[in-house]
Amino acid sequence: MKRVSILLTCILIFCLLAGCGGSAGYDNSYAAAEETAEEAYDSGFSDGGSGTDSAPAGEGADLSGLKLVYTGSVSVQSTEYEATVADIKALISEFGCIVETANESDYNTGWRDAGYKASAREYRWTLRVPSEKFSAMMDKIGAVHGHIESKDQSAEDMTKQFRDNESRINALKAQEQRLLSFMEEAKTVSETLEIEDRLTEVRYELEQLQTANNDIDFMAKYSKLTVRVHEVVDYDTTGMSFAQRVNQAFSDSSHGFVRVVQGLVIALIWLLPYLAIAAVVALILFLTRDRRAAKRALRQEKRREKKTEKFNRKMERKQARWDRKRRKQEIRNPPQDQPEVTPEEDGEE
Protein backbone atom coordinates (compact mmCIF):
# COMPACT_ATOMS: atom_id res chain seq x y z
CA MET A 1 0.00 0.00 0.00
CA LYS A 2 2.88 2.32 0.79
CA ARG A 3 4.45 1.63 -2.60
CA VAL A 4 1.19 2.44 -4.38
CA SER A 5 1.01 5.83 -2.59
CA ILE A 6 4.59 6.65 -3.59
CA LEU A 7 3.86 5.67 -7.20
CA LEU A 8 0.75 7.87 -7.38
CA THR A 9 2.68 10.82 -5.92
CA CYS A 10 5.39 10.46 -8.57
CA ILE A 11 2.82 10.36 -11.37
CA LEU A 12 1.12 13.53 -10.05
CA ILE A 13 4.45 15.40 -9.86
CA PHE A 14 5.29 14.34 -13.42
CA CYS A 15 1.92 15.64 -14.74
CA LEU A 16 2.39 18.99 -13.01
CA LEU A 17 5.86 19.41 -14.52
CA ALA A 18 4.55 18.55 -18.00
CA GLY A 19 1.71 21.11 -17.68
CA CYS A 20 4.11 23.87 -16.63
CA GLY A 21 6.38 23.05 -19.55
CA GLY A 22 3.49 23.27 -22.04
CA SER A 23 2.35 26.61 -20.64
CA ALA A 24 5.86 28.00 -20.82
CA GLY A 25 6.15 26.80 -24.42
CA TYR A 26 2.88 28.59 -25.31
CA ASP A 27 4.04 31.82 -23.70
CA ASN A 28 7.32 31.66 -25.58
CA SER A 29 5.54 30.96 -28.86
CA TYR A 30 3.12 33.88 -28.30
CA ALA A 31 6.02 36.23 -27.59
CA ALA A 32 7.73 34.95 -30.72
CA ALA A 33 4.61 35.79 -32.74
CA GLU A 34 4.61 39.34 -31.43
CA GLU A 35 8.31 39.70 -32.22
CA THR A 36 7.81 38.32 -35.73
CA ALA A 37 4.97 40.80 -36.38
CA GLU A 38 7.11 43.73 -35.21
CA GLU A 39 10.00 42.63 -37.42
CA ALA A 40 7.65 42.34 -40.40
CA TYR A 41 6.30 45.85 -39.76
CA ASP A 42 9.80 47.34 -39.38
CA SER A 43 11.07 45.65 -42.54
CA GLY A 44 8.00 46.72 -44.50
CA PHE A 45 8.35 50.31 -43.32
CA SER A 46 12.02 50.48 -44.23
CA ASP A 47 11.35 49.00 -47.67
CA GLY A 48 8.34 51.26 -48.35
CA GLY A 49 10.10 54.48 -47.43
CA SER A 50 8.51 57.91 -47.20
CA GLY A 51 5.87 58.84 -49.75
CA THR A 52 6.89 62.49 -49.76
CA ASP A 53 10.54 61.84 -50.68
CA SER A 54 10.02 58.87 -52.99
CA ALA A 55 9.77 60.89 -56.21
CA PRO A 56 10.50 64.49 -57.14
CA ALA A 57 7.63 66.74 -58.12
CA GLY A 58 9.44 68.38 -61.01
CA GLU A 59 9.01 67.73 -64.70
CA GLY A 60 9.65 64.21 -65.86
CA ALA A 61 9.13 62.75 -62.38
CA ASP A 62 7.52 59.34 -62.14
CA LEU A 63 4.28 59.89 -60.21
CA SER A 64 2.77 56.48 -60.91
CA GLY A 65 3.62 55.13 -57.46
CA LEU A 66 2.37 58.17 -55.54
CA LYS A 67 -1.04 58.57 -53.97
CA LEU A 68 -1.84 62.17 -54.90
CA VAL A 69 -5.30 63.46 -53.96
CA TYR A 70 -6.35 66.39 -56.14
CA THR A 71 -9.05 68.87 -55.11
CA GLY A 72 -10.43 71.73 -57.18
CA SER A 73 -13.23 74.25 -57.37
CA VAL A 74 -14.51 76.47 -60.18
CA SER A 75 -17.05 79.31 -59.96
CA VAL A 76 -18.57 80.60 -63.20
CA GLN A 77 -20.73 83.68 -63.81
CA SER A 78 -22.90 83.46 -66.88
CA THR A 79 -25.44 85.60 -68.68
CA GLU A 80 -26.43 82.50 -70.70
CA TYR A 81 -27.35 80.24 -67.82
CA GLU A 82 -28.96 77.40 -69.78
CA ALA A 83 -26.06 77.19 -72.28
CA THR A 84 -23.45 77.12 -69.51
CA VAL A 85 -25.26 74.41 -67.55
CA ALA A 86 -25.60 72.35 -70.73
CA ASP A 87 -21.85 72.70 -71.39
CA ILE A 88 -20.98 71.51 -67.87
CA LYS A 89 -23.30 68.51 -68.17
CA ALA A 90 -21.70 67.60 -71.51
CA LEU A 91 -18.23 67.74 -69.91
CA ILE A 92 -19.40 65.51 -67.04
CA SER A 93 -20.53 62.89 -69.54
CA GLU A 94 -17.42 63.29 -71.73
CA PHE A 95 -14.90 62.81 -68.91
CA GLY A 96 -16.82 60.02 -67.15
CA CYS A 97 -17.24 61.92 -63.90
CA ILE A 98 -19.11 60.59 -60.88
CA VAL A 99 -21.77 63.05 -59.70
CA GLU A 100 -21.89 63.00 -55.90
CA THR A 101 -24.32 65.93 -55.57
CA ALA A 102 -26.15 68.22 -58.01
CA ASN A 103 -28.32 71.06 -56.72
CA GLU A 104 -30.16 73.78 -58.62
CA SER A 105 -31.81 76.76 -56.94
CA ASP A 106 -33.95 79.61 -58.24
CA TYR A 107 -34.62 82.51 -55.87
CA ASN A 108 -36.02 84.81 -58.55
CA THR A 109 -39.38 86.27 -57.48
CA GLY A 110 -39.70 88.42 -60.58
CA TRP A 111 -41.48 85.68 -62.53
CA ARG A 112 -44.75 87.18 -61.25
CA ASP A 113 -44.13 90.33 -63.32
CA ALA A 114 -43.96 90.08 -67.10
CA GLY A 115 -40.75 91.44 -68.52
CA TYR A 116 -38.88 91.45 -65.19
CA LYS A 117 -35.70 89.41 -64.82
CA ALA A 118 -33.41 88.96 -61.82
CA SER A 119 -30.14 87.04 -61.42
CA ALA A 120 -31.11 84.35 -58.94
CA ARG A 121 -30.52 80.94 -60.52
CA GLU A 122 -27.60 78.80 -59.46
CA TYR A 123 -26.35 75.27 -60.15
CA ARG A 124 -23.82 73.40 -57.99
CA TRP A 125 -22.09 70.07 -58.65
CA THR A 126 -19.78 67.97 -56.52
CA LEU A 127 -17.93 65.68 -58.92
CA ARG A 128 -15.39 62.87 -58.81
CA VAL A 129 -13.16 63.21 -61.86
CA PRO A 130 -10.67 60.51 -62.95
CA SER A 131 -7.34 61.87 -61.76
CA GLU A 132 -5.64 61.41 -65.12
CA LYS A 133 -8.31 63.68 -66.66
CA PHE A 134 -8.46 66.24 -63.86
CA SER A 135 -6.25 68.90 -65.50
CA ALA A 136 -8.03 68.52 -68.83
CA MET A 137 -11.39 68.90 -67.09
CA MET A 138 -10.26 72.11 -65.41
CA ASP A 139 -9.08 73.51 -68.74
CA LYS A 140 -12.33 72.58 -70.51
CA ILE A 141 -14.45 74.28 -67.86
CA GLY A 142 -12.51 77.48 -68.49
CA ALA A 143 -13.78 77.48 -72.07
CA VAL A 144 -17.52 77.25 -71.31
CA HIS A 145 -19.99 80.10 -71.80
CA GLY A 146 -19.46 82.62 -69.05
CA HIS A 147 -16.86 84.36 -66.94
CA ILE A 148 -14.58 82.39 -64.60
CA GLU A 149 -15.05 84.09 -61.25
CA SER A 150 -12.64 81.86 -59.29
CA LYS A 151 -10.60 78.74 -59.94
CA ASP A 152 -8.68 76.78 -57.29
CA GLN A 153 -6.67 73.57 -57.44
CA SER A 154 -4.60 71.74 -54.82
CA ALA A 155 -2.92 68.35 -54.34
CA GLU A 156 -2.20 66.35 -51.19
CA ASP A 157 0.38 63.57 -51.10
CA MET A 158 -1.07 60.59 -49.18
CA THR A 159 1.71 58.16 -50.19
CA LYS A 160 3.42 58.02 -46.80
CA GLN A 161 0.20 57.26 -44.96
CA PHE A 162 -0.78 54.66 -47.55
CA ARG A 163 2.58 52.85 -47.30
CA ASP A 164 2.58 53.02 -43.50
CA ASN A 165 -0.85 51.40 -43.52
CA GLU A 166 0.36 48.72 -45.94
CA SER A 167 3.33 47.87 -43.74
CA ARG A 168 1.10 47.62 -40.72
CA ILE A 169 -1.37 45.46 -42.66
CA ASN A 170 1.39 43.02 -43.64
CA ALA A 171 2.56 42.82 -40.03
CA LEU A 172 -0.97 42.17 -38.78
CA LYS A 173 -1.54 39.49 -41.42
CA ALA A 174 1.65 37.69 -40.31
CA GLN A 175 0.51 37.94 -36.70
CA GLU A 176 -2.91 36.61 -37.67
CA GLN A 177 -1.37 33.50 -39.28
CA ARG A 178 0.79 32.82 -36.23
CA LEU A 179 -2.22 33.19 -33.93
CA LEU A 180 -4.20 30.73 -36.06
CA SER A 181 -1.40 28.20 -35.81
CA PHE A 182 -1.22 28.72 -32.03
CA MET A 183 -4.94 28.14 -31.77
CA GLU A 184 -4.56 24.75 -33.39
CA GLU A 185 -1.87 23.87 -30.87
CA ALA A 186 -3.74 25.22 -27.83
CA LYS A 187 -4.42 22.52 -25.21
CA THR A 188 -6.55 24.37 -22.65
CA VAL A 189 -9.68 26.48 -22.80
CA SER A 190 -7.95 29.52 -21.28
CA GLU A 191 -5.27 29.44 -23.96
CA THR A 192 -7.91 29.22 -26.71
CA LEU A 193 -9.89 32.15 -25.30
CA GLU A 194 -6.80 34.30 -24.94
CA ILE A 195 -5.77 33.62 -28.55
CA GLU A 196 -9.29 34.37 -29.78
CA ASP A 197 -9.36 37.74 -27.97
CA ARG A 198 -6.04 38.75 -29.49
CA LEU A 199 -7.14 37.48 -32.91
CA THR A 200 -10.29 39.63 -32.74
CA GLU A 201 -8.21 42.72 -31.95
CA VAL A 202 -5.83 42.01 -34.82
CA ARG A 203 -8.62 41.49 -37.34
CA TYR A 204 -10.45 44.67 -36.21
CA GLU A 205 -7.31 46.76 -36.62
CA LEU A 206 -6.64 45.07 -39.96
CA GLU A 207 -10.10 45.97 -41.27
CA GLN A 208 -9.69 49.59 -40.22
CA LEU A 209 -6.36 49.93 -42.00
CA GLN A 210 -7.66 48.25 -45.14
CA THR A 211 -10.69 50.60 -45.18
CA ALA A 212 -8.42 53.63 -44.79
CA ASN A 213 -6.22 52.48 -47.68
CA ASN A 214 -9.26 51.80 -49.85
CA ASP A 215 -10.44 55.36 -49.22
CA ILE A 216 -7.03 56.78 -50.07
CA ASP A 217 -6.89 54.68 -53.23
CA PHE A 218 -10.33 55.89 -54.33
CA MET A 219 -9.51 59.54 -53.66
CA ALA A 220 -6.25 59.18 -55.59
CA LYS A 221 -8.07 57.65 -58.57
CA TYR A 222 -11.01 60.09 -58.55
CA SER A 223 -10.27 63.72 -57.70
CA LYS A 224 -12.89 65.95 -56.11
CA LEU A 225 -14.13 68.94 -58.11
CA THR A 226 -16.78 71.47 -57.07
CA VAL A 227 -18.41 73.48 -59.88
CA ARG A 228 -20.73 76.45 -59.35
CA VAL A 229 -22.61 78.28 -62.10
CA HIS A 230 -24.29 81.55 -61.09
CA GLU A 231 -26.56 83.50 -63.40
CA VAL A 232 -25.97 87.24 -63.68
CA VAL A 233 -27.76 90.02 -65.57
CA ASP A 234 -25.74 92.83 -67.13
CA TYR A 235 -27.17 96.37 -67.31
CA ASP A 236 -24.99 98.06 -69.93
CA THR A 237 -25.60 101.84 -69.97
CA THR A 238 -22.32 102.90 -71.62
CA GLY A 239 -23.85 103.03 -75.09
CA MET A 240 -27.05 104.91 -74.11
CA SER A 241 -27.71 108.59 -74.65
CA PHE A 242 -28.89 110.92 -71.91
CA ALA A 243 -32.51 110.69 -73.03
CA GLN A 244 -32.34 106.91 -73.13
CA ARG A 245 -30.89 106.77 -69.63
CA VAL A 246 -33.62 109.11 -68.35
CA ASN A 247 -36.21 106.91 -70.00
CA GLN A 248 -34.64 103.80 -68.47
CA ALA A 249 -34.58 105.39 -65.00
CA PHE A 250 -38.24 106.46 -65.31
CA SER A 251 -39.19 102.96 -66.46
CA ASP A 252 -37.36 101.34 -63.54
CA SER A 253 -38.91 103.82 -61.09
CA SER A 254 -42.45 103.26 -62.36
CA HIS A 255 -41.92 99.53 -62.29
CA GLY A 256 -40.74 99.73 -58.66
CA PHE A 257 -43.77 101.87 -57.72
CA VAL A 258 -46.13 99.33 -59.28
CA ARG A 259 -44.44 96.53 -57.37
CA VAL A 260 -44.80 98.42 -54.09
CA VAL A 261 -48.51 99.08 -54.69
CA GLN A 262 -49.07 95.45 -55.62
CA GLY A 263 -47.29 94.37 -52.45
CA LEU A 264 -49.49 96.63 -50.33
CA VAL A 265 -52.65 95.29 -51.96
CA ILE A 266 -51.52 91.70 -51.36
CA ALA A 267 -50.72 92.54 -47.72
CA LEU A 268 -54.16 94.13 -47.29
CA ILE A 269 -55.87 91.05 -48.70
CA TRP A 270 -53.82 88.87 -46.40
CA LEU A 271 -54.84 90.98 -43.37
CA LEU A 272 -58.53 91.21 -44.41
CA PRO A 273 -59.82 88.39 -42.11
CA TYR A 274 -58.07 89.91 -39.10
CA LEU A 275 -59.38 93.38 -39.95
CA ALA A 276 -62.92 91.97 -40.19
CA ILE A 277 -62.65 90.44 -36.70
CA ALA A 278 -61.28 93.72 -35.32
CA ALA A 279 -64.19 95.65 -36.92
CA VAL A 280 -66.78 93.34 -35.32
CA VAL A 281 -65.18 93.79 -31.89
CA ALA A 282 -65.10 97.58 -32.32
CA LEU A 283 -68.80 97.63 -33.35
CA ILE A 284 -69.82 95.64 -30.27
CA LEU A 285 -67.89 98.03 -28.04
CA PHE A 286 -69.55 101.03 -29.72
CA LEU A 287 -73.09 99.67 -29.34
CA THR A 288 -72.64 98.82 -25.67
CA ARG A 289 -70.93 102.07 -24.64
CA ASP A 290 -74.13 103.57 -22.97
CA ARG A 291 -74.73 100.42 -20.98
CA ARG A 292 -71.15 100.28 -19.85
CA ALA A 293 -71.27 103.99 -18.92
CA ALA A 294 -74.45 103.43 -16.83
CA LYS A 295 -72.84 100.51 -15.04
CA ARG A 296 -69.75 102.57 -14.37
CA ALA A 297 -71.88 105.46 -12.96
CA LEU A 298 -73.83 103.02 -10.77
CA ARG A 299 -70.61 101.61 -9.36
CA GLN A 300 -69.35 105.12 -8.60
CA GLU A 301 -72.64 106.01 -6.84
CA LYS A 302 -72.43 102.88 -4.71
CA ARG A 303 -68.86 103.75 -3.73
CA ARG A 304 -69.95 107.27 -2.73
CA GLU A 305 -72.83 105.89 -0.64
CA LYS A 306 -70.48 103.54 1.13
CA LYS A 307 -68.08 106.37 1.91
CA THR A 308 -70.93 108.55 3.23
CA GLU A 309 -72.30 105.74 5.36
CA LYS A 310 -68.87 105.08 6.80
CA PHE A 311 -68.38 108.77 7.61
CA ASN A 312 -71.79 108.96 9.34
CA ARG A 313 -71.01 105.93 11.48
CA LYS A 314 -67.74 107.49 12.48
CA MET A 315 -69.43 110.74 13.51
CA GLU A 316 -72.07 108.85 15.49
CA ARG A 317 -69.35 107.02 17.42
CA LYS A 318 -67.64 110.32 18.19
CA GLN A 319 -70.91 111.87 19.40
CA ALA A 320 -71.56 108.85 21.61
CA ARG A 321 -68.11 109.14 23.20
CA TRP A 322 -68.63 112.86 23.84
CA ASP A 323 -71.99 112.22 25.49
CA ARG A 324 -70.49 109.57 27.78
CA LYS A 325 -67.66 111.81 28.79
CA ARG A 326 -69.97 114.74 29.50
CA ARG A 327 -72.18 112.62 31.73
CA LYS A 328 -69.15 111.47 33.69
CA GLN A 329 -68.09 115.09 34.23
CA GLU A 330 -71.57 116.09 35.38
CA ILE A 331 -71.53 113.31 37.96
CA ARG A 332 -68.11 114.28 39.30
CA ASN A 333 -68.61 118.05 39.36
CA PRO A 334 -71.69 120.19 39.59
CA PRO A 335 -72.66 121.94 36.40
CA GLN A 336 -72.13 125.44 37.99
CA ASP A 337 -68.50 124.72 38.91
CA GLN A 338 -67.41 122.82 35.74
CA PRO A 339 -67.23 124.53 32.32
CA GLU A 340 -69.02 122.88 29.50
CA VAL A 341 -66.94 120.44 27.34
CA THR A 342 -67.54 120.63 23.62
CA PRO A 343 -66.76 117.90 21.05
CA GLU A 344 -64.03 120.06 19.59
CA GLU A 345 -62.23 120.17 22.94
CA ASP A 346 -62.70 116.44 23.43
CA GLY A 347 -60.64 115.49 20.30
CA GLU A 348 -60.67 112.33 18.25
CA GLU A 349 -59.29 108.90 19.13
Image: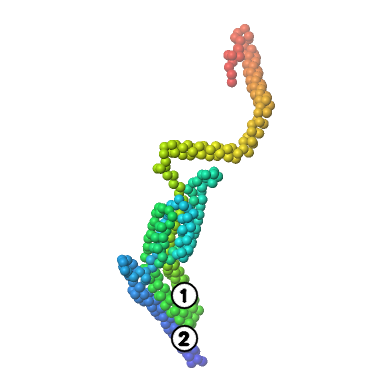
- Point out the frontmost of discs 1 and 2: 1
> Can you say whether 58 is above or below 337 in the image?
below
Residue 177 horizontal side relative to residue 284, left or right: left
**Furthest residue toward top:** 336
Q: Earlier in the sequence, mark 1 or mark 2?
A: 2
Residue 10 position (above or below residue 248): below
| Above/below status of 296 relative to 275 | above
Three-letter amino acid code at disc 1?
Leu
Q: Amino acid at mark 2?
A: Cys
Q: Residue at x 65, y 15 (%)?
A: 323
Give SS at disc 2.
Answer: helix
Q: Position of residue 203 (x, y in %)?
A: 46, 73
Relative depth, front residue between 320 and 114: 114
User: Which residue is disc 1 drawn over?
Assistant: 199
Mark 2 sits on what residue?
Answer: 15
Q: Is residue 54 left or right of residue 193?
A: left
Name the residue at 47% across, 86% down.
Answer: 15
